[in-house]
C-alpha cells in the first residue's frame, strides 16, 4: 500500500445521499502520483477517523490544486472542518468481492461468505456499484433457503441486538406494494393500549411513496437512538422509530438505500431485511401482512404462498414466532397516498372521525386483533372485538398521543400548497385501480421527499362515477412536480372505468 498523502479540504455541499464521495482534480499531484482514476475506492483519513470513499474526478476550477472536496455525508462522517488536511490512499483490498463475484456467476454462498460481504457493506467498504451488483446477483430466485437464513443471520450479527428481558414482544410488518396501507401506527396504538410491548422500528420508503417512518415523521420525532427508544418503550409500551437511526441490522439500511433507485425488492432480500430487523429489535412474535392483488407487490396466491413459506422457514431457523396474514390487495387502502396524507388518515381513524376511511379502520382492527390473539393477550376469536373496544373508547388514541409525546411531541401534518383534482372523462363504474401506476404518480408529485405531496383518492372499486366527477386529487409542493405527475398521467392513467360493474 502506498503512503497516505494530504490534501486541503474545501466545502462543496454536494448531497450524494449516504454515499461517501471524494472530489479531486485530475491534475492534482496526488491523483497523478498515486494513479488514481474516477471511481477508485480510497481510504480518507482525518484525525482519528477513517472512511472509504469513491473518487469523482474534477476537470474545472471548482477545486484548486492541492484541494479535495467531500460529499455532505462523507464530510459529516469525518466531522470535517473547512481547510483541514485529509490523507488519501488506496483502500484496502476487499476479499469479500470474490464471493460477491461468485454469486454473480450463479454459485451459492456459505455463511462465512455472507458474513464477509455483509460486514464490509455495514462498514461502508462497498461502493454503491458493488452493492447494486450484490443485490442483483441475489434477485430473481437466485437465493436458496439456507442462503436466505445465512444472509439474515449475517445482517443481525453486524449490528446491535436488543433484549427486552420479557416475552411476548410484538411486531407487525407489511411487505408493501399497496398504496396508503398505513395500518402500523394504528396497530401499535391498539396493541400498546392493551398492555402488550410493541417497539416498532420502521423503514423509510423503498419503492413506495411513503414508508411508516416517513408518515410518522410528519407527526413526531422518529430518529431515536437505542437508549431513547428504550425509555419510550419502558414508559409507554410502544414506539415509532426509524430503523436507520439505530444500529440494528445496519447493513440493511445501506442495502435499502441502493434498492430504492433500482426499484428492486427480491423475496430473499425482503425476507432477510424484514426478519433481521425484527430479530435485532428483540421481537418474539411478528405478524406479517401480505397484500395480494393484480398490481400489488405480491400478485398471485402462488407468489404469496412461496413468500409465506420462506418467511416462516427463515423465522423458525432464528427462533422467531411468526404468523402470516394474507389480505386483499386489489386497490389502495385509505384515501391519502404520501407521508402527510397518510398521516391524516391515521389520525382520523384514531380520533374516531366520522369521515375516517372505513377500509383502513377495518384492516387495522383485523391486524390488531390477530396480533392480540397471537401474543396470547386475547383468546382465539375475541381479538378483533378487543381491538375494536380499545379504538372506540379512545384508549388507542390516548396511547398514540402518549407515545408521540414521549418521543418529542405530537404535531399536525401539513397540507400541500398545490392541489389539482383529476376528473373522470366518461361516465361508468370503477373496474380497476393500478396500484403501481398510482404509486408512480404520487412519487412524481414529490412523495416521499416532499412530505405533503402525493394524492387523495375519491373513488374505490365498484363506485359509479359521472363524467366530470373527481377521481382523485394531486397534491404537490412545487409546480414542476405537479406538472410532471400530470404528464405521466396523460399516458398512464391508473383508474379504469367500464360501462358495467365487474366482479
Image (cartoon, helix red, strand yellow):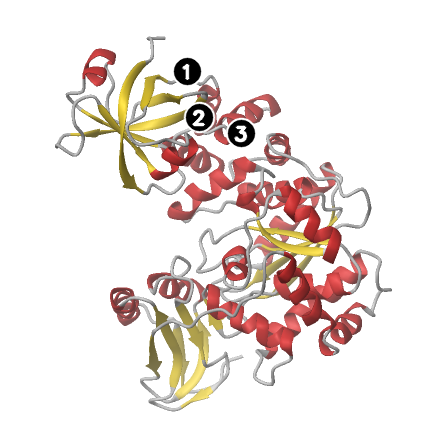
Circle on res. 498: none
Circle on res. 118: 3
Foreground: disc 2 or disc 3 = 2
- In the rendered view, would you say 406 is above or below 136? below
Label 1: how many Cα within 10 Å (few below 14, some 14–19, many 20+): few
Q: Provide the secondary structure element on which disc 3 rests.
A: helix
Mark pair 1, 2: CA separation: 9 Å
Circle on res. 92: 1
Nearer-N-terminus badge (1/2): 1
Residue 169 lies left or right of residue 183; in this view the side is right
Q: Quadrant of the N terminus?
A: top left
Q: Provide the secondary structure element on which disc 1 rests.
A: loop
Label 2: how many Cα within 10 Å (few below 14, some 14–19, many 20+): many
Label 2 near label 1: C-beta < 8 Å? yes
Residue 326 lies left or right of residue 85; in this view the side is right
Residue displayed at 49% across by 57% down: 214
Of residue 347 and residue 459, the one placed in the foreground of this image is 347
Residue displayed at 34% across by 71% down: 493
Foreground: disc 1 or disc 3 = 1
Label 3 near label 1: C-beta < 8 Å? no
Mark pair 1, 3: CA separation: 17 Å
Q: Whole-percent x and y of residue 39?
A: 29, 27
Q: Whole-percent x and y of residue 454?
A: 40, 67
Residue 37 lies left or right of residue 307; in this view the side is left
Q: Quadrant of the C terminus?
A: bottom right
Residue displayed at 18% across by 20% down: 28
Nearer-N-terminus badge (2/3): 3
Q: Whole-percent x and y of residue 115?
A: 58, 25
Can I make out residue 19 in this image? no
Q: Which residue position is annotated with label 2?
A: 125
Image quadrant of residue 281? top right
Mark pair 2, 3: CA separation: 10 Å
Amino acid at each position: 500500500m502506498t503512503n497516505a498523502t494530504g490534501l486541503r479540504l474545501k466545502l462543496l455541499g454536494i448531497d450524494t445521499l449516504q454515499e461517501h464521495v471524494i472530489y479531486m482534480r485530475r491534475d492534482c499531484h496526488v491523483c497523478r502520483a498515486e494513479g488514481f482514476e474516477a471511481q477508485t475506492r480510497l481510504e480518507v483519513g482525518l484525525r482519528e477517523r477513517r472512511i472509504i470513499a469513491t473518487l469523482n474526478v474534477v476537470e474545472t476550477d471548482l477545486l484548486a490544486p492541492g484541494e479535495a472536496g467531500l460529499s455532505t455525508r462523507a464530510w459529516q462522517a469525518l466531522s470535517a472542518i473547512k481547510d483541514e488536511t485529509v490523507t488519501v490512499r488506496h483502500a484496502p483490498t476487499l476479499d469479500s468481492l470474490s464471493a460477491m463475484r461468485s454469486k454473480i456467476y450463479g454459485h451459492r454462498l456459505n455463511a462465512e461468505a455472507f458474513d464477509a460481504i455483509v460486514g464490509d457493506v455495514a462498514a461502508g467498504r462497498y461502493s454503491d456499484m458493488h452493492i447494486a451488483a450484490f443485490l442483483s446477483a441475489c434477485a430473481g430466485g437466485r437465493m436458496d433457503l439456507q442462503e436466505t437464513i445465512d444472509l439474515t443471520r449475517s445482517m443481525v450479527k453486524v449490528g446491535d441486538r436488543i433484549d427486552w428481558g420479557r416475552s411476548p414482544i410484538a411486531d407487525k410488518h407489511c411487505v408493501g406494494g399497496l398504496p396508503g396501507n398505513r395500518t402500523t401506527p394504528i396497530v401499535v396504538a391498539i396493541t400498546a393500549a392493551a398492555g402488550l410491548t410493541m417497539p416498532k422500528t420502521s423503514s423509510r420508503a423503498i419503492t413506495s411513496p411513503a414508508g411508516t417512518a416517513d408518515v410518522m415523521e410528519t407527526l413526531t420525532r422518529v430518529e431515536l437512538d437505542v437508549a431513547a427508544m428504550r425509555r419510550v418503550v419502558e414508559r409507554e409500551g410502544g414506539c415509532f422509530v426509524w430503523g436507520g437511526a439505530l444500529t440494528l441490522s445496519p447493513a440493511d439500511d445501506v442495502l435499502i438505500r441502493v434498492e430504492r433507485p433500482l426499484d428492486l425488492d427480491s423475496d430473499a432480500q425482503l425476507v432477510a431485511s424484514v426478519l433481521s430487523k425484527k430479530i435485532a429489535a428483540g421481537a418474539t412474535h411478528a405478524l406479517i401482512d401480505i397484500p395480494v392483488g393484480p398490481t400489488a407487490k405480491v400478485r398471485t396466491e402462488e407468489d404469496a404462498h412461496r413468500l409465506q413459506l420462506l418467511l416462516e422457514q427463515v423465522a423458525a431457523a432464528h427462533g422467531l414466532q411468526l404468523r402470516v396474514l394474507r389480505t386483499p390487495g386489489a386497490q389502495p387502502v385509505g384515501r391519502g397516498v404520501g407521508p402527510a396524507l397518510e398521516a391524516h388518515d391515521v389520525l382520523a381513524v384514531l380520533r374516531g372521525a366520522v369521515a375516517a376511511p372505513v377500509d383502513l379502520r377495518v384492516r387495522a382492527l383485523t391486524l390488531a386483533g390477530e396480533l392480540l390473539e397471537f401474543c396470547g393477550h386475547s383468546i382465539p376469536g375475541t381479538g378483533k372485538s378487543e381491538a375494536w373496544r380499545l379504538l372506540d373508547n379512545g384508549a388507542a388514541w390516548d396511547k398514540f398521543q402518549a407515545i408521540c409525546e414521549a418521543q418529542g411531541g405530537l404535531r399536525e401534518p401539513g397540507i400541500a400548497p398545490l392541489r389539482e383534482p383529476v376528473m373522470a372523462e366518461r361516465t361508468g363504474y370503477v373496474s380497476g385501480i393500478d396500484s403501481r401506476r398510482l404509486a408512480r404518480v404520487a412519487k412524481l408529485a414529490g412523495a416521499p421527499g416532499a412530505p405533503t405531496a402525493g394524492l387523495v383518492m375519491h373513488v374505490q372499486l365498484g363506485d359509479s362515477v359521472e363524467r366530470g366527477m373527481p377521481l382523485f386529487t394531486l397534491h404537490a409542493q412545487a409546480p414542476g412536480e405537479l406538472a410532471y405527475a400530470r404528464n405521466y398521467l396523460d399516458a398512464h392513467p391508473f383508474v379504469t372505468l367500464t360501462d358495467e360493474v365487474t366482479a
